[in-house]
Image (cartoon, grey):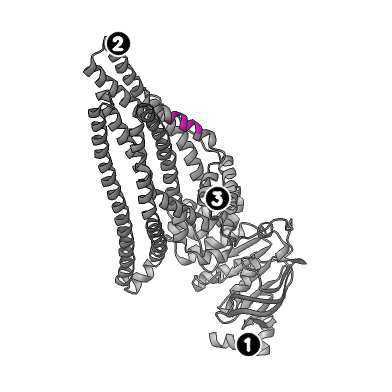
Amino acid sequence: MAKKNSFPTVHFSNEEILKREDQFIQSYRKNSGHFLRIFLSLFKGNYKNLLLSAFFFVLKACPEWILPLITADIINLATEKPVNAGPRFLFDLVLALVVLAQNIPNHMLHIRYLSRANRSVEAGLRGAMIRQLQQLSIPFHKEMPSGRIQSKVMRDVENIEGFSTQIFTTVLRVVITMSITLGVVLSKSLPVFFMFLAVVPFASLITSRFRKPMHNSNRDFRQSVEHTSADVMDMIELVPVTRAHALENKEINKLTGEMANIAEQGYRLDKIQSLFGSINWCLFSLFQIICLAFTGYLTYKGTIKNVGDITLYQTYFASLIGQVSSIINLMPVLSKGAESIHSVGEILCAGDLEDNTGKKKLNHLDGAYEFRDIFFSYDRDTPVLKGLNLTVKKGETIALVGESGSGKSTILNLVTGFYKPSNGSVIIDGNDLNDIDLRSYRRFLSVVPQKTILFSGTIRDNITYGNPHITKAQLDAVIDAAQLRSVIQRLPNGLDTNVGEHGDKLSGGQKQRVSIARAIIRNPQVIIFDEATSALDSVSEQQIQMAIDHLTKDRTTFIVAHRLSTIKNADRIAVIKDGHCVECGTYEELMEKKGEFYALKQIQS
């Protein structure tokens, strides 16, 4: 029979983690720029665990100051041979065994409560970052590479957890051990006590000398790792392109250079830390020799009367040096932890949030749109939309055509609320989009993007994403509508076939059909197709086009297409040029007009 684990499992509830997420976001914003305040606020709600951890830590660490007293007493008994030496010797021995025996269970209890607090903070901090990332605007995500974000969520939070462990063990040990050590020494010898205190100024001098170089080195190293993480992710995405154009050596040289730069940054950091540690060790070893000589001299002069006290002072001084050294050696960890807390703050304190607080929530959507004198630019120097005016009726299918860069995809981004116009208004069912809770609005939207986005999982998982209670009949209807039936029948595990990372086990056309199925299973009121058939062959395109024509019935639909033959059935076609809608009408009307649309069509003929 298996022995029961003496270290009980602790369960972290979703409710507890969610509560921590809100707390951490508020703590970062409230204490922005104050490293210590942020750190302490992370443990709000876990103070009881930390106190219990400290209590058991004191118990488990007591051999560090009790055993030197026992050792000194035994030496004094052996040299002085008093009458009651036997009972005292036995008492010392039993006491030594007891303080040693209690160390293991109390150490486990100390770690249990400390780990409970640390892991709660770790989970809550990562959860807060995930929540914040879901709320940050699309422009923020376009500006910050995903590799940097991944490094912050995983590496920096891990650094903070390691830092907190060091703080709550090292600092506690230092405070307790130094207090007891200096207290015992003060009660026995005032000269030795003052000699012990002489260590502190030297420790402070060393610490202040190395603080700034270590902080700068940690910051440079962290930024280099983040930058390279982003480039590694880009490299993985571009492997097919790199291989197809025989650019392997170019990518290898580029990434090898960045790895070399990280190695150099790490080497400089290691040099500073090792020099710091080496100087620290040499100085304190010198202090220990001075302590031995000083206490030996005091014993020779008769100031210290018991020989065993020399061992006591030497042991306590070694302990004191060890504690001061621990604080000094904590500086690299402190610097790394501070840099990681700052790094996490780049996400948690980011102000580019999509704020829906107090805005109108939509219970239904008709899908009537009006773009009133819209101006928009991604940067000040490059305007994209320049006074766009366009009206889309409820249930209407409108196709947006024009040259690349004319503003078609920007209009779709305005429809989804990913971007806001610099000037002008997007009116939906009579409501300004700026006054609408976008979360309630987007429940009625489905988007089929130009770049198909699938996650690692099965075809079923990707189609039903966000809709776990879809019935088999509903799923079958969507599969048929998206022309996926024949594809699924050819796959080894049908709907339960794993699509691989980013759907790489499927062809481009197959991925796009899955994306279309995922969009239409939501039964939306507004559908957005951004080059939805671009990855399909002619036969598949025709089949999908028929499905789209059926699905868009009575739904407001926006279609962006470069192949003009695919939008013949649109209710209206809007030609976008230089940030304006220059033409709008049916396919036949625009062809008869022989204007901008006619010219585009002639180019593709």
Q: Name the residue under label 1.
A: 596
| First along the sequence among labels 1 and 2 | 2
For disc 3, the marked residue is 128
Earlier along the polypeptide chain: callout 3 or callout 2?
2
Q: Which amino acid does label 1 sit on?
A: Glu
Residue 87's mark? 2
The type of residue carrying mark 2 is Pro
3D distance between C-alphas at marks 1 and 2: 109 Å
Front residue (pair 508, 121): 121
Q: Which of marks 1 and 2 is in front?
A: 2
Residue 369, by quadrant, is bottom right
User: Is label 3 in a helix, a strand or a loop?
Assistant: helix
Task: Identify the magenta region.
Answer: 51-57
In front: 465, or 567?
A: 465
Majority SS type along the magenta span: helix
The outermost residue toward the top is 83
Assess whether mark 3 and mark 1 are in contact (beta carbons under 8 angstroms): no
Q: How far apart are marks 1 and 3 (CA)?
A: 50 Å
Report helix, strand or loop for mark 2: helix
Q: Which of marks 3 and 1 precedes in the sequence?
A: 3
Is 583 in front, or is 499? 583
Does 251 appear above or below 401?
above
Viewer-side label of 1, 3: 3
In the displayed structure, 24 sits above or below 169; it is below
Residue 226, image x and y in percent? 42, 60
Q: Which residue lies furthest to the right in this view?
A: 430
- SS at mark 1 in the image: helix
Residue 498 seen anywhere in this rendered image of the structure? no
Q: Residue at x 73, y 61 (%)?
A: 365
Circle 1 Cα neighbour tier, 10 Å, few/some/many (<14 / 14–19 / ≥20): some
For the N terminus, which image quadrant?
Answer: top left
> In the rendered structure, which amino acid carries the disc numbered 3?
Ala
